[in-house]
Image (cartoon, grey):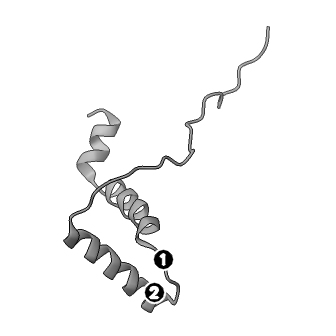
């Protein structure tokens, strides 16, 4: 009988393209944030690259969401 690996089923981490519409004010702020990062760090970044990082950070620090994920 073949042995089963403990890590047999890993989640698919393939990037998913998502098209969204942002309010103009949110887009302006996102561009301004990118500009501030470029001035601070010296490296330009486009808003489309920054948005996923911001969403990830937001969800990672939302305590209520963390509780929901744990099943409370």
Of marks 1 and 2, which one's residue comes earlier in the chain?
A: 2
> In the rendered image, which quarter is residue 59 located in?
bottom left
Q: Where is residue 48 in the image (x, y as percent from the top left)?
A: 43, 65
Q: How many marks?
A: 2
Whether pointer 1 and pointer 2 mark residues with C-beta atoms closer than 8 Å, the reply is yes
Q: Position of residue 32 (x, y in %)?
A: 32, 82
Left or right, 39 with respect to 20, comes to: right
Say which residue appears at 42% left-offset and 59% top-offset: 52
Q: Is mark 1 on a helix, strand or loop?
A: loop
Q: Where is residue 18 in the image (x, y as percent from the top left)?
A: 41, 49
Residue at the right extreme? 1
User: Which numbered marker is on residue 62?
Assistant: none
68 in relation to 21, above or below: above
Say which residue appears at 35% left-offset and 58% top-offset: 55
* Residue denoted by label 2: 38
Say which residue appears at 33% left-offset and 38% top-offset: 69
Q: Is mark 2 on a helix, strand or loop?
A: helix
> In the rendered image, which quarter is residue 1 located in?
top right
Other residues around mark 2 within 10 Å, as few (<14) / some (14–19) / many (≥20) = some
Say which residue appears at 28% left-offset and 57% top-offset: 21
* Residue denoted by label 1: 45
Q: Looking at this view, is 37 or 45 the one in front?
A: 45
Left or right, 13 with respect to 22, comes to: right
Q: Position of residue 10 (x, y in %)?
A: 60, 35
In what quadrant of the picture does the C terminus appear?
Answer: top left
58 in relation to 36, above or below: above
């Amino acid at each position: 009988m073949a042995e089963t690996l403990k890590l047999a089923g890993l989640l698919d981490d393939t990037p998913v393209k998502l098209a969204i519409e942002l309010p103009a004010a949110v887009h302006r702020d996102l561009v301004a944030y990118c500009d501030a990062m470029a001035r601070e760090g010296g490296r330009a970044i486009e808003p489309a690259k920054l948005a996923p990082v911001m969403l990830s950070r937001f969800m990672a620090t939302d305590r209520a969401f963390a509780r929901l994920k744990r099943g409370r």
